[in-house]
Amino acid sequence: MSSFLPHEIKVREGSGSAQGLRIAIVVSRFNNLVTDRLLSGALDALARAGAGADDLQVIKVPGAWEMPVVAATLAKLGQTDAIVCLGCVVRGDTPHFDFVAGENARGLTAVATDSGIPILNGVLTTNTMQQALDRADGIMGNKGAEAAVGAVEMVHLLRQLKGSKG
């Protein structure tokens, strides 16, 4: 049995600046008390990472259900390096939550794997509105900011893996 030392293994990890990256943010208007905070966090994180306003676009959709088709359209246009999807689905008394949350995740995953473009899923799926608020600029941080930072990291990681400068 062989053992490797950490310095003997090549590790690839995304990091870097958002400067010059073209990033689209698809945000749900449903539960806008939460999604407006997620969007604010994402835009702030991208600005701190060096993104320029001309390289960012925000696309507002009715809800999480509509995100996959918009993400697929953006990916096909080839004008973005990454897509950040932000939304909020709060569990209710009916199975509607399961359909919306599940199909959103399935659809965004399909777009990412089919297109090769990083699609960051910042759609909160919570049991209560308070849990959502806690994750949209509360005690759990801002998941919109985390998704935006993840998008930058993924663009650079994919460029490394493809042999481009990242």
Image (cartoon, rainbow, N blue to C red):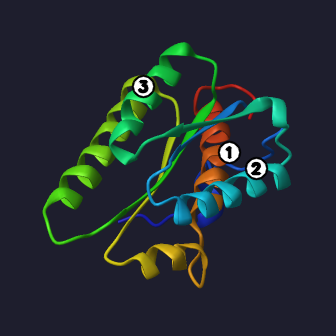
Q: Does residue 12 sit above or below 37 in this rendering?
A: above
First in sequence: mark 2 or mark 3?
2
Amino acid marked by disc 1: Val
Q: Identify the residue under disc 2.
A: 46
The label shown at residue 152 is: 1
Q: Is mark 3 on a helix, strand or loop?
A: helix
Q: How far apart are marks 2 and 3 (CA)?
A: 22 Å
Q: Does residue 147 sit above or below 27 in this rendering?
A: below
First in sequence: mark 1 or mark 2?
2
Amino acid marked by disc 3: Ala
Instruction: Please name the residue shown 37% across and 37% down the image.
Output: 66
Discs 3/1, front: 3
First in sequence: mark 3 or mark 1?
3
Q: In this view, does 24 lie to the left or right of 2?
A: right
Instruction: Please name the residue shown 52% across and 75% down the image.
Output: 133
Q: Position of residue 71 (x, y in %)?
A: 46, 31
Amino acid marked by disc 2: Leu
Q: Position of residue 19 (x, y in %)?
A: 84, 38
